[in-house]
Amino acid sequence: MEELIKEVAFKHGIALSKDDPILIIQTINNRLLEDSAKAQAALLEQYEHEIEKIMTKFKKQIFNQEKHLNQDNDNNVTIKKEEIKSYLSNFITQALIEPLAEIKSTQRQIKFSLNLCFISLAIILSIGSISIIAILMK
């Protein structure tokens, strides 16, 4: 209070006494500033607490999303494995099984042709034998 009285005297050239009513305003103003500072400190503490809660929630969300992404990656790996199996299965079917089916079909055709050859040979031998017999019987 003494310093305020000196400052007013120095700046404004007015001497104040300790019982001057204008100093009531200074007392009220100091009290309001103290109350305001306490209220601001309480708000700041509440704000910090809210930020900590938000950060904790945010960390949990990030953890859950990371966990979900890891699961998605695991699922993607499984999907990729299935795609690879399917591709290999199709490749094997096209590269090996289908040609084998064609080979078997060709083998059947060759067997059929061989059978025809044997039948033709049998017919020729039969005709030849009949001709030889006919010649011998003359």
Image: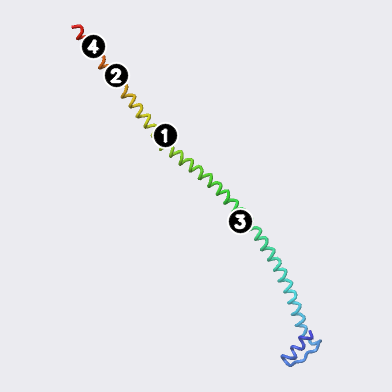
Q: Residues within 10 Å of mark 4 (few under 14, many from 20)?
A: few
Q: Nearer the viewer, mark 4 or mark 1?
A: 4
Asked if disc 4 and disc 3 are in contact, CB closer than 8 Å, the reply is: no
**Residue 10 image offset from top left, x and y in percent:** 74, 91
Residue at 34 percent across and 24 percent down: it is 111
Task: Identify which amino acid the numbered label 2 is placed on.
Answer: Ile
Q: Which mark is residue 130?
A: 4
Dot 4 or dot 3: first in sequence order is 3
Q: CA distance from mark 4 to mark 2?
A: 16 Å
Q: In whole angstroms, how far apart are the C-alphas of marks 3 and 2?
A: 82 Å
**Which amino acid does the dot numbered 4 rest on?**
Ile
Chain-order first, disc 3 or disc 2: 3
Left or right relative to 98: residue 63: right
Observer-side mark, 1 or 3, equals 1
For the residues carrying marks 3 and 2, which lies nearer the camera in this image? 2
Query: As rendered, which of 27 and 84 lies closer to the eye?
Result: 84
The alpha-carbon separation of the residues under discs 4 and 1 comes to 49 Å
The residue singled out by tag 1 in the image is: 97
Q: CA distance from mark 2 to mark 1?
A: 33 Å
Tag nearer the camera, 4 or 3: 4
| Amino acid tagged 1 | Ile
Depth check: give the residue in front, 45 or 63.
63
Q: Which mark is residue 119?
A: 2
**Which residue, given by chain and number where applicable, does mark 3 sit on?**
62
Indicate the amino acid at tag 3: Ile
User: In terms of sequence position, does the residue under pointer 2 or pointer 1 come before the other?
Assistant: 1
